[in-house]
Image: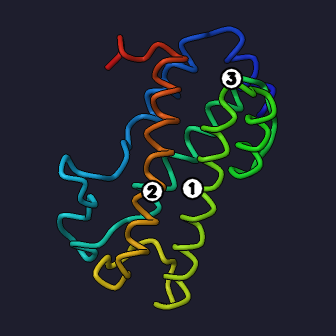
């Protein structure tokens, strides 16, 4: 499987562009007024989906970037560590993504333990002001890595 992906990447540059566009589908989860983007309807109305809105953009970005570098690692935190070593010029961005992902993972785990579920959906009203701020601070890493992807893969023309 991995060989097939490597061959596709080598043969078709556009493959990375499509993966890049996919990595940009979930922008940082804050509204224009810096409010959390929450679910609008359904069973989790007014809750924050930490997996889809915060963790997956970091996962998707790491997958794309390691594929483009032909790095074979299957762990998001380790992917960012490897990217920081491979690209010292972008080390700060990658380390910020690594730290943000760890923080998001901690939030999700704590929520899951507290509510005896997956921890995916968070009622933001139950978080302290400091926790909400810590969560928001993770979103800068999402914006920075998505900006890097948009520039590197020249995706403005596709958007």
Q: What residue does disc 1 label?
A: 100
Residue 125 point in image, percent of width and height: 28, 81
Work out whether mark 3 precedes mark 2 in sequence or the reverse, and give the earlier one: 3
Label 3 SS: helix
Instruction: Label 2: state its secondary structure.
Output: helix
What is the crowding at mark 1: few (fewer than 14 residues within 10 Å), some, or many (at least 20)? many
Please name the residue shown 34% across and 52% down the image. 29
Q: CA distance from mark 2 to mark 1?
A: 8 Å
Q: Is residue 102 left or right of residue 32?
A: right
Position of residue 61 measured from the top left corner of the image (x, y, whole percent): 56, 38
Q: Nearer the viewer, mark 1 or mark 3?
A: 1
Visual colour scheme? rainbow
From the image, tell me which residue sits under label 3: 68
Please tell me which residue lies in front, 10 or 69. 69
In the image, taking residue 90 as reference, residue 7 lies left or right, namely right
Which comes sooner in the sequence, label 2 or label 1? 1
Q: Is residue 32 above or below residue 106?
A: above
Looking at marks 1 and 3 on the same chain, the residue that comes earlier in the sequence is marked by 3
Q: Is residue 9 above or below residue 38?
A: above
Residue tagged 2: 137
Which structural element holds mark 1? helix
- Which quadrant of the view contains residue 82? top right
Which quadrant: the C terminus? top left
Query: What is the distance, in whole Å, between disc 1 and disc 3 at their CAs?
Result: 22 Å
Q: Nearer the viewer, mark 3 or mark 2?
A: 2
Crowd band around label 2 with a 10 angstrom C-alpha radius: few (<14), some (14–19), many (20+): few
Residue under the image location 41 percent in, 75 percent down:
130
Front in this rendered view, residue 151 or 129: 129
């Amino acid at each position: 499987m991995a060989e097939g992906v490597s061959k596709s990447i080598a043969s078709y540059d556009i493959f990375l562009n499509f993966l890049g566009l996919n990595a940009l589908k979930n922008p940082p989860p804050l509204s224009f007024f810096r409010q959390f983007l929450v679910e609008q309807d359904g069973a989790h109305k007014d809750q924050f989906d930490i997996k889809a809105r915060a963790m997956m953009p970091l996962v998707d970005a790491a997958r794309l970037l390691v594929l483009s570098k032909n790095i074979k690692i299957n762990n998001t935190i380790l992917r960012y560590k490897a990217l920081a070593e491979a690209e010292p010029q972008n080390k700060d961005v990658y380390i910020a993504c690594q730290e943000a992902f760890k923080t998001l993972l901690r939030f999700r785990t704590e929520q899951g333990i507290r509510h005896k579920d997956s921890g995916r959906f968070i009622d933001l009203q139950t978080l302290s002001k400091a926790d909400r701020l810590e969560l928001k601070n993770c979103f800068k890493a999402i914006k920075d890595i998505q900006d890097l992807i948009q520039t590197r893969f020249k995706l403005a023309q596709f958007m």
